[in-house]
Amino acid sequence: MDTEEDEAIKKEWATYRQEQQAMRLSKVGAERITHLRNQLNEEPATKQRELVVAVDGGYTNRTVFREKPEGATLIGRIRKDAHLFDAPAQTDGARGRRRLYGEALRTPEQLRQDEKHCVAVGQSACRGQGLGL
């Protein structure tokens, strides 16, 4: 009898883990961005428009970036030491394992220090508290 109960408990935990995986905020956020882009594509007046979405730092992750639809731009905070890579080059019929990463890009901190890129510094307020930008 214990083994039947143990099996039932294991099955319940497996179901619970699957539900938790499907309901992660980043997964749901990526699905909603894709849904919004699809709605814009259905209308002739908005089909060619770029969808620009400002997201919280919790959405600047692999899950969201991999599911980002064509025609959508995400703006969000990432770590200044984040290692960024370009998309891998398409290699049709090439031997070996498919590449996961493309060329290494500069880190956000390296871009910030580059004089070619404009960095705006400003002030903002939230709940009466001054914030430096």
Image (cartoon, rainbow, N blue to C red):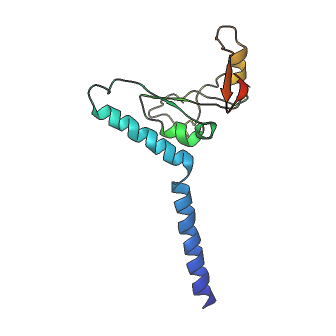
Determine whether, in the image, residue 31 is placed left or right of residue 117: left
Whether 32 is drawn above or below 106: the answer is below
Residue at 44% x, 43% y is: 32
Residue 72 point in image, percent of width and height: 45, 30
Tally the marks: 0
Determine whether, in the image, residue 76 is placed left or right of residue 28: right
Which residue reaches farthest front? Answer: 128
Q: Quadrant of residue 42?
A: top left
Residue at 53% x, 40% y is: 64
Q: Quadrant of residue 60?
A: top right
Of residue 66 and residue 100, the one placed in the foreground of this image is 66
Whether 130 is drawn above or below 31: the answer is above
Determine whether, in the image, residue 92 is placed left or right of residue 102: left
Residue 23 point in image, percent of width and height: 52, 54
Q: Quadrant of residue 126?
A: top right
Can residue 98 be spotted in the picture?
no
Residue 94 point in image, percent of width and height: 49, 34
Which residue reaches farthest bottom? Answer: 1
Q: Quadrant of the N terminus?
A: bottom right
Q: Quadrant of the C terminus?
A: top right
Which residue reaches farthest top? Answer: 116
Residue at 67% x, 23% y is: 124
Of residue 65 and residue 91, the one placed in the foreground of this image is 65
Can residue 20 be spotted in the picture?
yes
Residue at 58% x, 39% y is: 59
Residue 54 point in image, percent of width and height: 54, 31
